[in-house]
Image (cartoon, grey):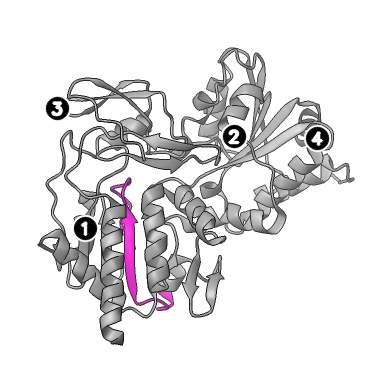
């Protein structure tokens, strides 16, 4: 783990921001009366820092909405999980160490695990399972891409700084062309602003029908198949893709419609065909709030991604049936463990099931009821060190603590909880 000593109050700390999928590492934070972003500019980083105090939290664990000691909360949580026939672990907002501890607890309890934005995450996972893929890294986009095609909209929200992160407008690639396939009027205005950067040209290609039809038509034309009534702008894009030295097709899985994995697969066909004669790749942005990290860690440890469980039949993976909301709606689970270490607004879905929440202190109210357990945990990159996997999978980045937290790490809490669950089950079996 990254054990760097936090900087003294008032000193600048070199900082990797954990609050978006890009994990930008060129920022600086100063701890004073507040956590101040003192070097670099990012609205998402500023908003994330504003959710944390400039000194360690005094938040207490709670059981049934009442403050208690950590050991009591862990025992209460163990009682819930030890007595549960089918637990659900949701949210999953944590780092590498937390994910490893979650996996061990999931194996001990037979839990099904799904991220807070699991439907979006599974779009890319399912396409990769079915067809494979050819992806790239942020560094490759920065250093090589002369054509960037944004599918369905410009990167925003959890990937709002994509173009800055990829050096669009910088001299590393003197001439870049950015294409918006579809998008809104506001996005077209943002694209025009991007075109005022040095060496950057832009264009918008309207959809022909919906995004499914347009990307499918694009794939057919790149493959050289005949098609009727191809819009001139789309045909021109085919020519640009073939002529580019390094084309990158970018999209956000969270913005894809239902069954969006079909769009991911069609983009994959475009990229595969182009790579027979030039260089091309796809980049699907998503997996924020730790979701990409947990998915990767579970895959390392079990060979299966999220929406899996170690149950009576062994390892099982159900990318549709094991969706958290579907399980809750169908009454297929009887307890919920929710984790959100980074995002204070990522509360568990409404449920009357026995509930365990571990995360940001602001989430206490979401478990303040009978049958609820809340345990505040330290946020990696704020009160404790840690590691996250970037959206492109190209790097495992260390997170530096800004101060020494009084809250326990999620990994430590889960280790104690796993021990307590096993002890309860051993006593029951004796």
Residue at the extreme front of the image, as rendered: 430
Is residue 352 in view? Answer: no
- Residue 375's tag is 1
Residue placed most toward the observer, 185 or 331: 331
Q: Residue at x 17, y 72 (%)?
A: 370
Q: Is residue 340 left or right of residue 288?
A: left
Q: SS at mark 2?
A: loop
Q: CA distance from mark 3 to mark 2?
A: 37 Å
Residue placed most toward the observer, 180 or 52: 52
Viewer-side label of 4, 2: 2
Q: SS at mark 1?
A: strand
Residue 421 x, y percent position in the rendering: 29, 72
Of callouts 3 and 2, which one flags the residue occurring earlier in the amino acid sequence? 3
Residue 117 x, y percent position in the rendering: 45, 54
Corner quadrant of residue 368: bottom left
Viewer-side label of 3, 2: 2
Q: CA distance from mark 3 to mark 1?
A: 26 Å
Q: CA distance from mark 4 to mark 1?
A: 56 Å
Please name the residue that numbered disc 2 is placed on: 137
Of callouts 3 and 1, which one flags the residue occurring earlier in the amino acid sequence? 3
Of callouts 4 and 2, which one flags the residue occurring earlier in the amino acid sequence? 2
- Residue 33's tag is 3
Q: Which residues are magenta?
A: 329-347
Corner quadrant of residue 29: top left
Q: CA distance from mark 4 to mark 2?
A: 27 Å
Of callouts 4 and 1, which one flags the residue occurring earlier in the amino acid sequence? 4
Please name the residue that numbered disc 4 is placed on: 235
Viewer-side label of 3, 4: 3
Of callouts 3 and 4, which one flags the residue occurring earlier in the amino acid sequence? 3
Location of residue 367 with respect to 257 vertically, above or below:
below
Residue 302 x, y percent position in the rendering: 53, 62
């Amino acid at each position: 783990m990254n054990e760097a000593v936090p900087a003294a109050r008032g000193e600048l700390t070199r900082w990797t921001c954990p609050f978006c999928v890009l994990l930008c590492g060129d920022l600086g934070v100063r701890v004073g009366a507040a956590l101040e972003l003192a070097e670099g500019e990012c609205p998402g980083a500023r908003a994330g820092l504003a959710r944390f105090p400039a000194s360690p939290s005094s938040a207490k664990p709670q059981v049934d909405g009442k403050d208690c000691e950590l050991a009591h909360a862990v025992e209460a949580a163990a009682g819930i999980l030890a007595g549960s026939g089918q637990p659900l672990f949701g949210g999953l907002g944590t780092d590498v160490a937390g994910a490893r501890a979650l996996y061990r607890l999931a194996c001990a309890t037979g839990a099904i695990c799904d991220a807070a934005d699991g439907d979006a995450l599974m779009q890319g996972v399912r396409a990769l399972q079915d067809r494979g893929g050819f992806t790239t890294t942020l560094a490759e986009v920065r250093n090589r891409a002369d054509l960037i095609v944004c599918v369905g909209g410009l990167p925003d929200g959890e990937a709002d700084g994509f173009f800055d992160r990829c050096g669009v407008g910088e001299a590393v690639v003197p001439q870049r062309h950015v294409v918006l396939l579809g998008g809104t009027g506001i996005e077209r205005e943002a694209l025009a602003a991007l075109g005022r950067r040095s060496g950057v040209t832009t264009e918008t290609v309207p959809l022909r029908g919906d995004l499914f039809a347009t990307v499918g038509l694009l794939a057919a034309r790149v493959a050289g198949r005949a098609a009727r009534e191809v819009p001139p702008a789309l045909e021109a894009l085919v020519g640009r893709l073939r002529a580019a030295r390094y084309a990158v097709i970018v999209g956000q899985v969270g913005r894809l419609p239902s069954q969006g994995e079909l769009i991911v697969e069609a983009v994959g066909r475009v990229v595969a065909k182009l790579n027979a004669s030039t260089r091309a790749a796809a980049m699907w942005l998503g997996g924020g709030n730790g979701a990409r990290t947990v998915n990767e860690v579970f895959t390392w440890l079990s060979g299966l991604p999220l929406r899996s469980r170690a149950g009576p039949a062994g390892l099982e993976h159900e990318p549709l049936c094991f969706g958290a909301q579907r399980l809750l709606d169908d009454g297929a689970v009887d307890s919920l463990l929710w984790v959100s270490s980074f995002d204070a607004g990522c509360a568990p879905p409404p449920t009357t099931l026995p509930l365990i929440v571990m995360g940001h202190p602001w989430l206490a109210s979401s478990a303040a009821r009978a049958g609820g357990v809340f345990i505040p945990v330290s946020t990696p990159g704020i009160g404790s060190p840690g590691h996250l996997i970037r959206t492109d999978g190209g790097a495992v980045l260390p997170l530096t603590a800004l101060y020494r937290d009084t809250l326990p790490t999620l990994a430590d809490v889960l280790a104690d909880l796993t021990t307590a669950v096993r002890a309860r089950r051993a006593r029951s079996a004796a």
